[in-house]
Image (cartoon, rainbow, N blue to C red):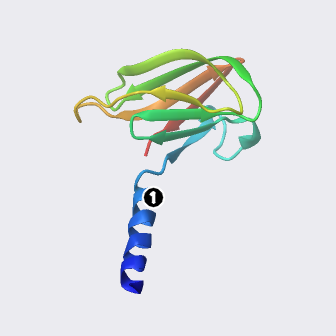
């Protein structure tokens, strides 16, 4: 019985970590990594979903997601705040994967790379 219980717990832990979102490191262009992180929105990716949230509300944020060839896969203008904003950006048949994200707002340009 204990062996089955242990295997069940291991399976649940594996399933939870396999579907966990990966945080995308976002940096202000022209600055060194790690500077002014308190003003940088949090971006994560979980398969085809990209989630963005921020401590404060940011209106009119332009989000541009590009593939490994530099082609725009997604472009939109969003209002981002403490509640998560989720964008559906599907990869196309393994041919084209998300590699970079650019955020433009308040005369700022932030950039990040998907892992």
Residue displayed at 45% across by 34% down? 49
Residue displayed at 77% across by 30% down? 56
Q: Nearer the viewer, residue 36 or 49?
A: 49
Q: Nearer the viewer, residue 6 or 88?
A: 6
Rendering coords of residue 91 (x, y %): 32, 31
Residue most extreme to the front = 1
Quadrant of res 38: top right
Rendering coords of residue 96 (x, y %): 28, 30
Q: Is residue 112 left or right of residue 48?
A: right
- Secondary element at tag 1: helix
Rendering coords of residue 37 (x, y %): 71, 42
Q: Is residue 47 left or right of residue 112?
A: left
Q: Is residue 34 left or right of residue 46?
A: right
Residue displayed at 42% across by 77% down? 5
Q: Is residue 24 above or below residue 78?
A: below
Residue displayed at 23% across by 36% down? 94
Q: Would you name the residue on which mark 1 appears?
A: 17
Q: Nearer the viewer, residue 74 or 18?
A: 18
Rendering coords of residue 108 (x, y %): 68, 23
Quadrant of res 114: top left
Quarter that holds the N terminus: bottom left
């Amino acid at each position: 019985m204990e062996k089955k219980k242990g295997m069940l717990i291991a399976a649940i832990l594996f399933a939870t970590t396999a579907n966990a979102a990966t945080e995308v490191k976002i940096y202000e262009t022209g600055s060194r990594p790690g500077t002014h992180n308190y003003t940088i929105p949090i971006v994560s990716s979980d398969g085809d979903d990209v989630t963005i949230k921020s401590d404060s509300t940011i209106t009119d944020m332009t989000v541009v997601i590009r593939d490994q060839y530099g082609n725009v896969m997604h472009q939109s203008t969003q209002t981002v705040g403490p509640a998560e904003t989720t964008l559906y950006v599907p990869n196309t048949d393994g041919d084209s994967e998300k590699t970079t994200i650019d955020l433009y707002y308040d005369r700022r340009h932030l950039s990040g790379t998907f892992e």
